[in-house]
Amino acid sequence: MPALLTACTSSEPEPAAIPKRLQDTRTFNPITPTLTALPGAQLFQGLYPGIQGQAAYVVEVPHNWNGTLVMYAHGYAGMGADLKVQTPSLRAEWLAQGYAWGASSYSSNYYDVRAGLEDTNALALEFSRLTGQAAPRKTVIMGVSMGGQVASAAVEAETQQTARSRVNYAASMPVCAVLDPVYEFQWLGDYTQAAAQLAGYGGTYPNADFQKNLPAIKAALFTSSSGPSGRRTGGPGPISATSPGN
């Protein structure tokens, strides 16, 4: 009886479809920056293509540039339509030591690490075209809060394999980074629910009306909520009066 031979074939698995998110249905408005260059530096700013549409950018290069580019990834910027570049607090220090820096508004707001990563990488790759400078000898990335998660993801092996725009960063510095987002958002939900409950605005969990009720919640819990701290009602001593966020 003749033997039956069967051929085995293998193929790469189809990439998983990226689920649609609320921000994917939104149209955003990138705001062209109007910064002034610091002494001893040249400033470049405008708009460029991001992963979800136009994004705003700033790149600043000191005259004594040492060949290293620092990419700055900003934190959560809310859910509004306007996209704005956030200036890093270390801007002057970087320039004084010869480092160039660049930052993107991202092409999307919301908690969108993918847009932050792809748009920051795309801007880094546009450095020479935008500035007329040689390509950086070294590129590093720093991010704060949600931007810290962007900075962490930027150096992962998976990102190097799957990102649309890929940058081989020499180093990453996440600051106050959201590296356990499930726990982070659980904490934010608990914190806001507790504040709403104490003020008489309990409702459902998570508290979908927290932002709408925030002025009334603060008025119920604090005699003063201006500045970085406030004085609570019914007890001595200042406590934090700012709502949690990035």
Image: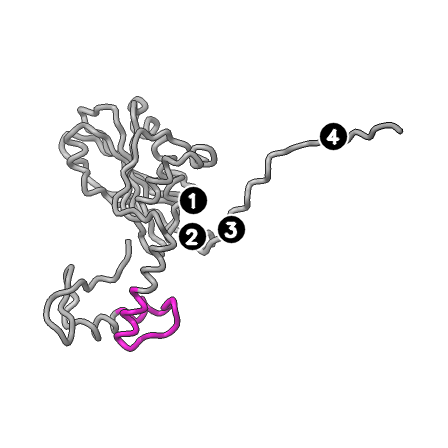
Look at the image and tell me in which quarter the N terminus lies.
top right
> Where residue 232 sits: x, y (%)?
15, 71
Q: Which residues are magenta?
A: 191-214
Helix or strand or loop: what does disc 4 sit on?
A: loop
* Amino acid at pointer 1: Gly
Tag 1 or tag 4, which sits nearer the N-term?
4
Query: Which residue was labeled with disc 2?
Result: 27
* Amino acid at pointer 3: Pro
Q: CA separation, marks 3 and 2?
A: 18 Å
Q: Comparing marks 4 and 1, which lies closer to the viewer?
A: 4
Which residue is located at x 12 percent, y 65 percent? 238
Q: Comparing marks 3 and 4, which lies closer to the viewer?
A: 4
Which residue is located at x 87 percent, y 27 percent? 2
> Where residue 214 sits: x, y (%)?
27, 69
Disc 4 and disc 1 in contact, CB within 8 angstroms: no
Tag 4 or tag 2, which sits nearer the N-term?
4
Which residue is located at x 54 percent, y 46 percent? 17
* Amino acid at pointer 2: Thr
Q: CA separation, marks 4 and 1?
A: 46 Å
Q: CA separation, marks 2 and 4?
A: 50 Å
Query: Which residue was labeled with disc 1?
Result: 53
Per the rendering, the mark at residue 124 is: none
Per the rendering, the mark at residue 19 is: 3
Q: Is residue 208 above or below residue 175?
A: below
Q: Comparing marks 3 and 1, which lies closer to the viewer?
A: 3
Per the rendering, the mark at residue 7 is: 4
> Where residue 66 sits: x, y (%)?
21, 24
* Residue 190 vs residue 47, the one in the foreground: 190
- Location of residue 134 (image quadrant): top left
Q: Comparing marks 3 and 2, which lies closer to the viewer?
A: 3
Q: Assess disc 2: are there few (<14), some (14-19) or many (≥20) residues with their C-alpha within 10 Å of its C-alpha.
A: some
**Magenta-colored stretch includes residue 117:** no
